[in-house]
Image (cartoon, rainbow, N blue to C red):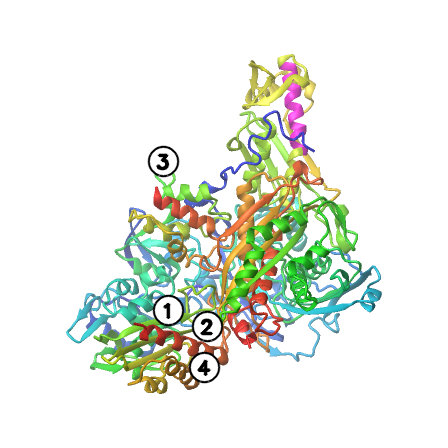
Amino acid sequence: MTDWQTQAEGRWSGKRVQRLEDPGMLTGATRYVTDVQMPRMLELAFVRSHAPNARIVSIDLDPARAVAGVRAVLGPADVVDIQPTVDILHLDGALKTPRFTLPGDRVRYVGEPVAAVLADDRYTAEDGADAVVVELEPLDDAKPIHDDIPNDRYFHQAASHGDVDAAFGRAHHVVRRRLHVQRVITSPLETCGIVADYDAATGELTCYLSTQQPHLARAALAEAVGLPVSHVRVICPAMGGGFGGKEVMLPEYLCAAVAAIRLRRPVRWVEDRSEALTAGAHGKEAEAELEAAFGEDGRILAMRSRFVSDTGAYSSGIGAYVEFMVGAFTVPGLYDLGGYAYDTGGVVTHKAPLSPFRGVGMTTSQTLREVLLDDAARSLGIDRMELRRRNMVADGAWRTVLGEEYEPGSWRTAFERALELIDYEGFLARQAAAREQGARPPRLLGIGVSPFVEAAGIGSAGGAGGLPGGSHDNATVAIDLSGRITVALPTFSHGQGHRTTAAQLVADMFGVAPDDVRVIDGDTARTPFGMGTFGSRSGVFIAGTVNRAGRLVRDKLLRVGEILLEAAHEDLELVDGAVGVRGVPSRRIPLAAVAGAAHFAPHVRAELGDPTLTATAFFDPPRPTHSNGTVAATVEVDPDTGGVAIERIVVVEDCGTMVNPMIVDGQIRGGVAQGVGLSLLERYVYDESGQPQTTTLAEYLLPRATDVPPVEIEHIETPSENGTGGIKGMAEGPASATPAALVCAVFDAIAPHGSAIEELPLRPETIAAALT
Amino acid sequence: MKPSAFEYLAPESCDEALAALAEHGDDAAVLAGGQSLIPMMNLRIAAPPVVIDIMRIGELRTIDRGEDWIEIGAGIRMAQAERESGVPLIERALQHVGHSAIRNAGTVCGSIAHADPAAELPAVLLALDGEVVLRSARGRRTVAADEFFNSYFTTAREPDELVVAVRIPATRRRVAFLEVTPRLGGSTGEFATVAVAAAAGRDDAGHLTSVSLAFAGVAERAIRAREAEAILVGAEPTRDAIADAAERAAGETDPPADVHAGPEYRRRLVRALTRRALEELASP
Amino acid sequence: MTAISLTVNGAAHELDVPPRMLLSDLLRDELGLTGTKIGCAMGACGACTVLVDDEPVRSCLMFAVQAHRRSVRTVEDLASPDGDLHPLQTALREHHGLQCGYCTPGMLMTITPLLESGQPLEPDAVREAIAGNLCRCTGYETIVDAVVEASRR
């Protein structure tokens, strides 16, 4: 679908256009939720459980009320009317865990909110929260976390494709690998937050919310507090990172909303870093096992996987399902498996509930599978990359063993190019020399290579295994009387520069400059319905909706041009902010005049029917896009300390047609950095009694500038067949493949000396212990 | 994460500060740079009813150099000490302390008084056989570093006393400072899993005299590996002698476990860091 | 309440503040300068970094009362009153050294003093200098590139 490019032939798309978002952010003018201030606003602080598993005997709120400056206190009794949050999935056999805003009977994880204190400022609110007396009686750990889920397993699904048992039966060689992927925290720099404001006169609730899904959040808020959706507005002014952690409807948001409604005053809750680490957006934790049956030539006959997500205390959010479902489905990746069986599911535990986190499921499946392939190559005596070559699918469309249809991509080409860039053969020679250093202690060098594929832009046809797909999005394009173009989008950028990308697309469609395009997002009152930003979907949906809505408006503009210029449609073009006759620069009408005519010239208005030059259109992709690439990494391990130094990271990325390569590169670098954190630094620890041990950033280690090496990036562009304009969704692929590459590299470095490691992250202590 | 309320005092002289400490004792926390105290107060781990800010006291903002010693006053920020303390081991160690913005506010004496067993400066003071100068309304005393540090965040300071300075003997010994963190690629900064602050003299024959090996992150306070030191005094620093000393140093420690590392790994780091520090000190 | 006088972005202020009010909250809530962000309240993330007497410090680890008679600069002071970006801001934009923008004010205030010497900076030195500022989006490299280039202009 290429007619989205105007006669201007893509002046802006494909260029490294500087972002429209930047000046506000650079000068401190951009307002995030926590910067929103309203008169008479109250601040909210929570009383949270100190026990992982206890009956609530009593909650005494009176001492908090006695603190000067405390204006109100909410306990469980005050929020019983709020509908419990529950996931909207319809999966056979899924046991639900409806989540009440403040549990009245029982606490299930350390940090679970049990009461809320509202005061003139956050300092006083915390004083009030300290004063509340909560009596807890520890419960037996043998007791099920939810009464309806006797063995804590809320969902389980197993399936088999191809004759897996027979394949294992006749295998020349079987390799098994286990991995415990650690619990991590999404940790955007901006924590969660809400400002809730209720207008008693109109009965309307407005919530400034740091959310990736404004329209879904609006619906969830409305349902929970019992207001019609029409009376709820969600505004996300700017978001300081999301990464999946801001997709959930938190009980804290509901408390703030209810408090605002009852007290008739704006209420603000800002999650502080302690809360974020203790009870905020946790991610990824899973036990995973993989086994593969190989023929004598190293061809994979079949694989079997097993995933168990450690979901935390509630399975009421999407994070409770995506990890183990996507994990199981993405094991095949770019490899041709004769058969594949999976067994996947989740258990509830006395921990904070799991949220989606960039690369859901893929971090686990990618890392486990690539580690297993390296193991297999070593035990089969085949070069690790050669083993991959023998099993990797050819460039082009591909139907996987699970029946997933990959659109054409550059799977092998990207892989081979990455090997060239990292100089695989040269590295092996260096590695061998370093290992043979005789009297001097050997240097431990290692290399890991992880090809990846990433599906994105899933429409209603694409819901895998019962998980809802991305459904559809709408976009509205409008031209106002000043002749400026406005695009309204239901996605919300956490930093991916949607406004710039959308402006570039629109600028090309209408022959204007991106600076002249106004993009509105994050406000449910000013944008049409859509599913928001997650799963690398926004590029595809923005391109698809903007193209469709934009063409409708363009057609109207050209229609006005036909009338005013007395020219035929095919002779007209949009160029330099005007409608004009092609090749006749003197016959042009600026867009403002076109808009003026549409509204105020009676014959034009009558011809158009609707003079507002606005159109809203939806996009529901019949098939998803598939981006791909390869991450290659070389490392050196210090044999004394177990410390890892990353020498080089190379990424070859093919995300189809790139609208803004600068933004794409940024997503790659950010994903790689998160991959460094996931594989080598970050871990959230609970001790055996369920007490968190990593509650500050001194214990939970996020990657710093001195941890992340420069990333060498090269692009291939295989235009998408399914994404408008050839665009493919991207940004989770490199994030998932980087841990795979780094873990493989470290294992390669210690292979001659070390025993198998089954725990992530690969901390220096873990590596040192594995070195014999 | 907002602190509890407190009464704030900002004395302008040492005597005023000491009178306030005499009055409030255990109820008072001393505020210098605040880089250790304020995080604890923000987390409400510490909630002192009284906070005495000593940074307006001019007489504490000095670095005094005598013939045989250097005295760093309680008002000297780490960034300034990093540039001009005149004590090479302190200047080296400070590069590893937190990050530059932390060092712009935090003070040398504040870190000493805080006595975090994983902190760099207590180990440095111990390695250099430094002293802590304490004053109270009752008088003045100096305490050797080894007597000053007791246990986790506890020192010999009485509740009515103020650390007014640290005193470091002048020395011509070579020094080394090495640190291992949980991070990648040998990066500096933030905090140590284990750190070694080392000093050693050499005689004309090339034998080591007066060896100090002090460690952070291996016990409930900074410690000296005295048995390892004893092996080396008077000895030629051969590879075997260094390996023995490293082994002994590791054996002398009984490190605790925390979320970052367990005892065995910490001992391994002691061994490795001792070896590397001694190799550096022994190099021509 | 304690009376303090301080200068913020060149403007003198006489205020009465509770002793426990952090400088970050004075700037954001009392003076409406919300450009300075709070990321962790314990000095680890650097988002709250401002200049106090021309040196970067964590405003979340300073009580407002400690800023008495001192001069504070925040990110709002970098661009010219007409809105022209500071060269470092321009460089960050050109190099895509920001994505969500939340770490950016703290980064800017940490880096600005480094450029004052006029000496060209090496990438490793820049990496060390910003090691105290967490960014979850960019992977840091484009920030380093921007600073290196700005130091050479």
Q: Amino acid at mark 4?
A: Pro
Q: Amino acid at mark 2?
A: Arg
Q: Is residue A249 left or right of residue C38?
A: right
List the residue tagged with mark 1. Answer: B36
From the top left corner, tell me how far across and down residue A5 is, in percent.
63, 30
In the drawing, what numbered circle is on residue C82?
3
User: What separation in Å lies between label 3 and label 4 (alpha carbons)?
Assistant: 59 Å
Whether residue A269 is visible here, answered yes or no, is no
List the residue tagged with mark 4. Answer: B255
| A176 over A704 or under it: above or below | below
> Mark 4, mark 1: which one is toward the viewer?
4
Q: How packed is label 1: few (under 14 Cα within 10 Å), some, or many (20 or more)? A: many
Q: How packed is label 2: few (under 14 Cα within 10 Å), some, or many (20 or more)? A: few
Q: Main secondary structure of the magenta part?
A: helix
User: What separation in Å lies between label 4 and label 1 (alpha carbons)?
Assistant: 23 Å
List the residue tagged with mark 2. Answer: A440
| A295 over B146 or under it: above or below | above
Q: Is residue B77 left or right of residue A305?
A: left
Which structural element holds mark 1? Answer: loop
Question: Are callouts 4 and 2 both on one chain?
Answer: no
